Image: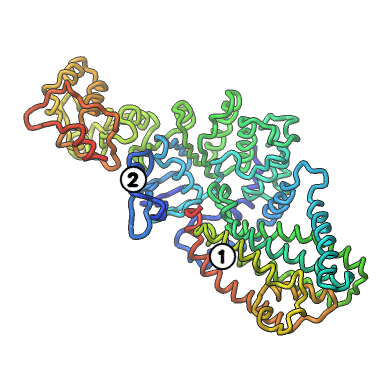
Amino acid sequence: MLCGFCGDLLKINTPQIDNSKNSFTETLVDLHQGLMMYHLWGRLGWNDILQRYRRSRLGPLWLTISMAVLIGALGLLYAKLFKVDVAEYIPFLAIGFVLWQLISGILLDGCNVFVHSEGIIKQIKLPLSLHVYRVLWRNFLTLLHNSVVVVFVMVYFDIGVDINTLLALLGTFFIIINGGWFSFLIGMLCARYRDLNPTIASLVTLSFFLTPIIWNPSLIPDRAFILLYNPFFHFVESIRAPLLGQPVQVETWWILTLITALGWIAVIPAVSKMGRKLVYWL
Amino acid sequence: MAFIELKDVCIDFPIPKSRLNVGLKRSLRHAIGGKLKSSVGVSYVRALDTINLHLTKGDRVGLVGHNGAGKTTLLRVLAGVYPPSSGEIKCKGRIASLLDISLGFDLEASGIENIFLRGLYLGLSKQQISKCVDKISNFTNLGDYLSMPIRTYSSGMLMRLAFAITTEVEPDIILMDEWISVGDAKFMEQAKERLESFISTSSIMVLASHSEDLIRSTCNKAILLGQGEILAQGSVDEVYHHYNFFGSSAFFNIDEYISIHPDLEASMSVPGMAPWMHFIRYGIFEGRSPGCGISLEAFDNDPVFASAIQARNGLAAAERIENIAPFLSSFVPPKGWRQNKELSYPDEFIETDGHPLISIEESLAKYS
């Protein structure tokens, strides 16, 4: 009556309940098991996007369209306000805006990663990291939709592409990988402390204005302080600069590596500690 | 071989203190549900209290108890969702939980797409699901509906879909919460057949339900939960009699009954003889105490009790004890027992010397 085949894989995927295990390795196993369920989180992440546009004719294409409209309108307006060349400003704005959408998307979704999955977490034992991968994947897919606009803008304004442009991929990788530890940690904290979520939301809005997305970093005479200590600047710059054919400061790469390393090193023990209590907070 | 073992498992739900004022606390204590306890900073609701359980191959267990008794929490512990606050849980075998019909369903997607989605939740790969998808579709009997978005389904149809997928993966342990209540008669028949077929191969099933018929027809064991504790466990008959006669916060204490009447040990080993049964059939006529500090001498002058005994109606006599017990000054309530607020004071009861009654106010103050 049943496919015996199904059983074998299930055996691997069904986590065995065992209290004696060290919770530190438990977290690593969780991260690995979650990753291996890529069929599931891949599907769920994509479903999240589809769901937003169900029964609409254009579907997820709306992501691209609304981004294009926003960049077109803001680009023309601010180029005039800042008195800069449209051909220079629009590519700058387009890339920055699309990246900010990725960053803020991960930050805001990260807060709700476990709270919104309450229904699943309380019904079935699955690796917690699965929900994190789902959020990252969803935001990555949104990025792909939005980057159509970037490609279009770059072609239209005839921006040259060379081998250095590939560095942008490295920058994207950094954003996603850091989104991982951030969502994992903040998702748990937001489940425990429900006031944290609105706090983060308002900080994200603030950061948007503090980070050079709509204004050019060269506008600040003394570049060092407000930019050097703004991690978002480095994340954005590591992608925007290569795409625009500008050099990336070496310090940016150092800072990104440092944030990534420290983030993951700090988060694994923290998550190991909170992981077992999470379901009680939901 | 599949097994589940729970050793002194407790589940405490934290409630931050600021959200729990004194009045609420008092009313919560009266309300249905677990027991409140607090330590510094945080209050806890103890949803499960020192649960010991051992289930092996072939066990089909029905969980019985009123709302808030801990049935769903226990299922979730078994599913590995709640790590125990204290105690130990050992579990071997593939678990499939059917606690929530709609788990992982995407209402806008078609039935077939949802088979894939649910299959992924259960840990299958896409290829494996493709192999099973025909069998699952056949079992659901949904025909062309499978290509429609499932938001158009009735709850019974969703149930069919969920049940078909969950049982198709051949779990060793299947956990179900009130699953069949929405199915129609034909589906219930089909479902029972399938359950029986895989139970016979190696599995454990745990089912929580308020439907006595369902538990009687699908389970071979039952557990009575009350306020997060196991009040009785054994055959379905035994547990239901216990539940129906004494309720889920029984004043009749099985262990105590056996320990204060050691001469009963031999008769207890007769198959089908439960302590409560002995009490109703024989003990009550022999003047044996049911435990909890209740002496049957207290009923010597009571006309209601006397006429029940005379009519050889053990059940009516036990009911009388249950109504009077909370007012007996010597009454020692079992763990987790609560005074029913609607209980009226037995004016017609005639006290015996040495066994005075307390007033209704005293009783409420004492036991709530």
B52 over B290 or under it: above or below: below
Q: Where residue B108 sits in the image (x, y, percent)? A: 71, 40
Q: Nearer the viewer, residue B293 or A141?
A: A141
The colouring scheme, among rainbow, by chain, secondary structure or one colour, is rainbow
Q: Nearer the viewer, residue B86 or A71?
A: A71
| SS of the residue under disc 2 | helix
Label 2 resides on the chain identified as B
Marks 1 and 2 sit apart, C-alpha to C-alpha, by 36 Å
- In the drawing, does residue B89 fall left or right of residue B275? right
Circle 1 Cα neighbour tier, 10 Å, few/some/many (<14 / 14–19 / ≥20):
many
Q: Which residue is pictured at 88% across the width and 68% down the height?
A: A154
B134 over A14 or under it: above or below: above
Q: Where residue B76 sits in the image (x, y, percent)? A: 48, 46
List the single residue furthest toward the left.
B353
Look at mark 2 in the image and give the residue it sits on: B23
* Amino acid type of the residue that numbered disc 1 sits on in the rendered structure: Leu
Q: Quadrant of the N terminus of chain A?
A: top right
* Label tally: 2
Q: Which residue is pictured at 83% across the width and 54% down the height?
A: A65
List the single residue furthest toward the top.
B311
Q: Where residue B56 sits in the image (x, y, percent)? A: 45, 44
* Amino acid type of the residue that numbered disc 2 sits on in the rendered structure: Gly
Q: In the rendering, which numbered label is found on residue A185?
A: 1
| SS of the residue under disc 1 | helix
B147 over B314 or under it: above or below: below
Q: Is residue B355 visible?
A: yes
Location of residue B310 (image quadrant): top left
Q: Nearer the viewer, residue B144 or A101?
A: A101
Q: Where residue B123 sits in the image (x, y, percent)? A: 63, 50
